[in-house]
Image (cartoon, rainbow, N blue to C red):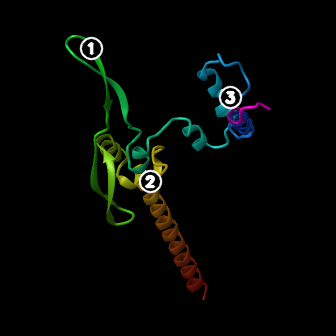
Amino acid sequence: MFRNPAMNRCISAAARWQQSALAVPTTSMTTPVFQLLPSIIQQSSSPQDIGAIRYRSNRSRRGLYDGKDIRTGNNVSFSMRATKRKFKPNVFTKRVYSEILDEMVRFHLTTSTLRSIDKAGGLDNYILTSKHVTSGEGQVVKERIQSKLAYEDRLKAREEQAAVASSTD
């Protein structure tokens, strides 16, 4: 133990990290991250853990951003002086029609999401098949769509049972 309590906290935090499910193998501090990633991915149990490695801003978690997020770069003037800037995704609020829910659903979405929705064949197909719908508004609607589909399947099964029961009588 160290005399400095802050160092003790750092060591205990490192010990907890090594005991966690995504523990980084003990290597030297000079090991590049890209060499550690395969072992981290191998230790993870689900595909969502793999996606958790990439940072997503709170803003992009909320709506349908189709993998787009805030990027950083430089404004370069004529004199080649570089000043930092942010590249923000083209986000707007739009109502999109869901065929399964039979209603207009409001989302914060990007223009690339609109193109992806068209390519997938509609909002419902996009939400059910896209790897980018993991939280926020998209996840809420995805759960609603899945519950409605499950409900319709249960109704169809009951109707088939009733038809079989009435035909045997």
Q: SS class of the residue under badge 1?
A: loop
Q: Tell which tag, 2 or 1, sits nearer the viewer.
A: 1
Q: Residue at x 71, y 36 (%)?
A: 5
Residue 44, position in %: x, y? 67, 39
Image disc number at residue 39:
3
Q: Residue at x 64, y 33 (%)?
A: 41
Residue found at the far front of this picture: 3
Q: Which residue position is annotated with label 1?
A: 81
| Magenta segment includes 45 | no
The residue type indicated by label 3 comes to Ser
Please, what is the three-letter code of the amino acid marked with disc 1?
Arg
Numbered disc in front, either 3 or 1 = 1
x, y (%) of residue 126? 40, 49
Secondary structure state at the residue bearing disc 3:
helix
Which residue sits furthest left? 78
What crowding class fits label 2: few (fewer than 14 Cα within 10 Å), some (14-19), or many (20 or more)?
some
Sequence order check, earlier mark of 3 and 1: 3
Q: CA distance from mark 2 to mark 1?
A: 39 Å
Q: Amino acid at mark 2?
A: Gly
Q: Dot 1: few (<14), some (14–19), or many (≥20) neighbours within 10 Å?
A: few
* Magenta highlight range: 1-7
